Amino acid sequence: MLRARKRVAVEVEKHSPLRYPHRLNFYDQPPQGEITIEEFEICALDRLRILAEIESSYARNRPWDELKKYTLEQCKKYLHLDASSATLQDVDSQRRKDHIGHFVLRLAFCRSEELRRRFVKAETTLFRIRFEDDDRKEREDFLQSRQFSWTPVMKDEVEQYAEQLKAAASTYLPPKDQVDLEKEKYCKVHWTRVPDLIEKRKVFLRHGMAYVPSKEQASIVYEEFQRNLENALLVTLKHLPRLDEDTRIVPLLDNLSQGFLAGVSSEWASATTAANGDEITAEMIDELARKHFPMCMRHLHDTLKRDKHLKHFGRLQYGLFLKVLGLSIEEALAFWRRSFSGMTDDKFNKEYKYNIRHSYGLEGKRANYAAKSCQQILLSDQPGPQDSHGCPYRHFSLDNLQTALLSMYSSQGLTVKDLPEIVAQVKSGHYHVACTRVFEITHAAEGVRKGEGVGGGESVTHPNQYAARSRELEKKIKEEADGDITMS
Ligand code: SF4
């Protein structure tokens, strides 16, 4: 995490009321002025959470309404944009954050064709969701503020092609309704600008021009947004070498793009604190692992029990996870000592105790180390054949993964029938989506439905988030049961 409040030469607009008149933005101009590295990073990370969730929604084949609902929930949390009429809110600050985040991500995602393609798809989806969700008046003001280079179709031309226009309308209107050509407003654009409407035969075509009814004009707007962004990313790519020497920004951009490629946006917010404030003890870990751990931690726990030992990266991944779960240093020392039952006290004290205390910030630099996020586990310190750290969804063979899933989670409701869906996500590289699906299946008895993820449709981005949510659900069920007993 970059903490320095140094100024970077990124131009950002100085804040002033209603500098951004519209909630919707085509991002034609880069931000102007100065921003701090921290702001640069926060704006990008918060936007990335939303784009990563959009990608996850596509990977999970969510219907459009569901994708929109979950994306809007994420936007509310991380990138809320109020209407211009919300006079009590600082709408300009919200829009400035949106503006900066978009441009930082352009820098991060212009660098390969794969990244550009995925970024354009996620950004165009976000724009479409906001466009559909915007209030009608503000949306019209926005459309009028731009030149969309479409030609209005005059009344006499509408009359001339009335029959063809009615025939095209029959594809998008219910059979009982007829298009009212007196009221309907059409515009003409070159057919290449509305490929989706052509594909669905929703428009009348003549001399290479598509006649688009008002209801479908949004398609032109989305297509133009997408085309502009594709071109802008190529322009950004050309200018990127100038940034190569900036040692503050380049690692940050690398981190952002790697996270997006791994399908995971960022670290879970509570990664350095105990998940729900409850301390846990060494005795509780066996049971917690069985009920609440994601596969990566369950595998480390099982390996530790079997081998009475874990290699360095495994200890690091598991130890920090347990720390954030609420295991105090005293309990951690007791847990690891008991787990390494095949060695003498002397060896344990000499070779392991220091490292355990170090991870709690009690030795060396005395830093408060955060537990590793899915992004870090998926991308760094790749495990070798003898290692047990890493993410099983990514690092196990498909055969081993399926066997391990059944052995770990069949007591929580996972069956052979669930495997093809999980394997399909793994094959397409959406490891955390596979993990999220396993969470949903193994918590179905607690009322978690497909698509809900770890709450509000969110996907798993951190092992501690998985465990914390799982424990929360158990606590809730218990409280409800206790309430029922008291009532009766
Ligand atoms: Fe662990 Fe994350 Fe992999 Fe799930 S997706 S197993 S939480 S690293």
Image: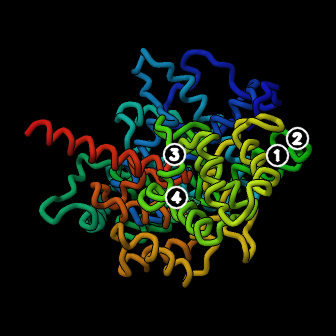
User: Which tag, 1 or 3, sits closer to the chain's start?
Assistant: 1
Q: Disc 3 designates what residue?
A: 281
Horizontal arrangement in the rendering, residue 392 relative to residue 61 (left or right): right
Mark 3–mark 4 distance (CA, rounded to whole Å): 38 Å
User: Type of residue at label 2?
Assistant: Asp
Cα gap from disc 1 to disc 3, whole angstroms: 42 Å
The residue wearing badge 2 is 246
- Residue ID at (76%, 30%): 3
Q: Position of residue 403 (x, y in %)?
A: 49, 81
Secondary structure of the residue carrying tag 2 is loop
Looking at the image, can residue 472 be seen? yes
Alpha-carbon span between mark 1 and mark 2: 6 Å
Secondary structure state at the residue bearing disc 3: loop
Label 1 sits on residue: 250
**Residue beneath the point at 88% across and 47% down:** 244
Secondary element at tag 4: helix
Q: Amino acid at mark 3?
A: Thr
Q: Can you say which quadrant of the picture contains the C terminus?
A: top left
Q: Residues within 10 Å of mark 4 (few under 14, many from 20)?
A: many
Question: How many neighbours does mark 3 have within 10 angstroms: few (below 14), some (14-19), or many (20 or more)?
Answer: some
Q: Is residue 310 above or below residue 406?
A: above
Specify how the rendered protein is coloured.
rainbow
Mark 1 and mark 2 in contact? Answer it, CB < 8 Å: yes
Left or right side of 248 for 196: left
Instruction: Kindly identify the residue that appears in the image at 27 percent across and 62 percent down.
Output: 172
Q: CA distance from mark 4 to mark 2?
A: 30 Å
- On residue 55, the disc is 4
Comparing labels 1 and 3, the label whose residue is closer to the camera:
3
Q: Earlier in the sequence, mark 1 or mark 4?
A: 4
